[in-house]
Amino acid sequence: MSSHETPARPAQTLHPRNRHQGRYDFVRLTRASSALKPFLVRVPEGGTTIDFTDPRAVRALNQALLKADYGIAHWDVPDGYLCPPIPGRADYIHGLADLLAADRDGDIPRGASVRAFDVGTGANVVYPLLGHTEYGWRFTGSDVDAKALAGADAIVRSNGLMQAITLRQQRVRGQLFRGLVGADDRFDVTLCNPPFHASAAEAARGNQRKRGNLGARKPAPARAERPPRLNFGGQDSELWCPGGEARFVSRMIAESAGIGRQVLWFTSLVSKSAHLPRLRYELRKAEAVDMREIAMAQGSKQSRFLAWTFHTPDARRAWWTRGADSRKPTTRHGKA
């Protein structure tokens, strides 16, 4: 199995194609969504920001960003569900585009023939929204939580994206691909933001600590390259699972081997570098042909996504020479 790690970009930078470089333009954002205006606060230095400890403010900021920059007119999440920072989520999508382009002599694949599978899409369905807007890809999003999928379905339908985004419910807790990826399905890439914590108590302690850190800091001019460090909200399945992130991704690797011919690249975020040695071992055991550790730098936070494939370089190049019909999965909108 070949392997390499892509160096991180310079600290406090986003991907070059990320729309959220520099300071948030709150004048432009409030023009797009007036719901953001009540949450703006002035800081002593003369700038404008929001209170990132207030989940209502973060939600309003996301609504404004999605509307102003991606044309998503209707977006909301049920109370208590994950409300993710948009700039960091966009970075993952752009990283995936670069990963796919590497097998195409640098040419980024675009359009509806490109199919992506989002494991744990959540009520926010952010990755499919961003990936479809940026590159025209078609997405299948999965989740074990019926209420989350209902929220995602409402977003998809209210924005008229039923042909671009399909949703499937995982009815067996603990399974990731099994029961969802059929024999006729083909995906160019999978993606996932796995639960980080190993227990509900650990998740609660982590959120409390992050809230304390945010509350102790004086407000500073908001910068897109310093997205909020706390993803507010989150149900159990979004925040924790037995064994935490390492076990979750290990299970994903094990299941991926069974559908390795049907997917070009599997990927997952890995928040802690300490988990990588175990995951490399799991990939060797699964007989992955190639793996990549794609580093991302978002402010002071270093992150990465892990990518692996069961296709040789020649097979990956051949994958793209086939007609789109030979790669596309069978899809239908709504919960399978």
Image (cartoon, rainbow, N blue to C red):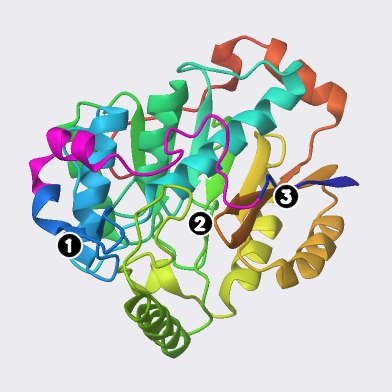
Tag count in the figure?
Answer: 3
Q: Give me the C-alpha separation between circle 2 and circle 1.
A: 22 Å
State the image coordinates of residue 78 (x, y, percent, origin top left).
Answer: 18, 60
Q: Which mark is residue 193?
A: 2
Disc 2 residue crowd, few under 14, some 14–19, many 20+, Cα 10 Å: many
Which kind of residue does numbered mark 3 sit on?
Ala
Along the viewing direction, whichever of 172 and 265 lies nearer the viewer:
265
Mark 2 near mark 1, Cβ–Cβ under 8 Å?
no
Residues in magenta, as a range: 11-35
Dot 1, how many residues are within 10 Å of its Cα: few (below 14), some (14-19), or many (20+)? some
**Vertically, is 234 above or below 212?**
above
Q: Which residue lies under the disc numbered 1?
A: 56
Residue 12 at x, y = what percent? 57, 51
Quadrant holding the C terminus: top left
Identify the residue shown where x is 84% and y is 64%: 281
Residue name at image x 25 percent, y 27 percent? 71
User: Is tag 2's residue or tag 3's residue first in the polypeptide sequence?
Assistant: 2
